[in-house]
Image: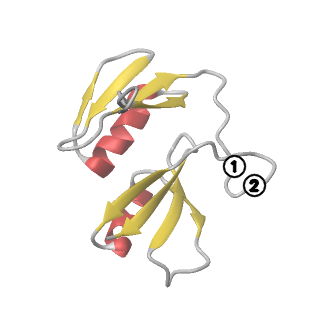
Amino acid sequence: MALAKLGVVVLDCPDPRALAGFYAEVLGGTVEGEGDWVDLAVPGGQSLSFQAAPGHVPPKWPAADQSQQFHLDLTVDDLDAAEQGVLALGAQPLDTEDRSRGWRVYADPAGHPFCLCAC
């Protein structure tokens, strides 16, 4: 028997509304709230929340001496089309060396790593 259930994943960032807007464009959904805490209600999925962290320092990827802390795996039908979309929204590529594998690594506008994964 589980002791708890997952409520929400929260990403620290300097601008919660802006980062929620980025993920709303990537995943769909509705941005709710203002100020230091903003939620993204994702259709048919787990909500994401974004919390203001004025001293936020983005994780480094890959770096053995500085943990990435966590990352999101986002499933897509077309890697090339999804890549163009996230880049247009402000994502930065973190790993462009091997284009033959079924996943690619990016940083969101606040520096959190995420992967686009072919389904």
- Residue found at the far right of this picture: 65
> Is 37 displayed left or right of 113 in the figure?
left
Closer to the camera, 84 or 74? 74
Instruction: Check disc 2: other Cα within 10 Å, few if <14, some if 14-19, many if 20+.
Output: few
Residue 39 is drawn in which quadrant? top left
Quadrant in which the C terminus appears: bottom left
Residue 111 is drawn in which quadrant? top right
- Residue found at the far left of this picture: 44
Residue at the (66%, 43%) spot, across then down: 59
Instruction: Check disc 1: other Cα within 10 Å, few if <14, some if 14-19, many if 20+.
Output: some
- Residue found at the far top of this picture: 35
Residue under label 2, please give it. 63
Residue at the (30%, 32%) spot, across then down: 40
Residues at discs 2 and 1 in contact (Cβ within 8 Å): yes
Residue 24 on image: x %, y %: 29, 42
Indicate the secondary structure of the residue bearing disc 1: loop
Q: Is residue 95 above or below residue 52?
A: below
Residue at the (34%, 17%) spot, across then down: 34
Closer to the camera, 77 or 8? 8
Q: Is residue 48 above or below residue 85?
A: above
> Which disc, if any, is residue 38?
none
Closer to the camera, 52 or 88? 52
- What amino acid type is highlighted by mark number 1? Lys
Residue under label 1, please give it. 60
Indicate the secondary structure of the residue bearing disc 2: loop
Residue 23 on image: x %, y %: 36, 43
- What amino acid type is highlighted by mark number 2? Ala
> Is 78 displayed left or right of 44 in the figure?
right
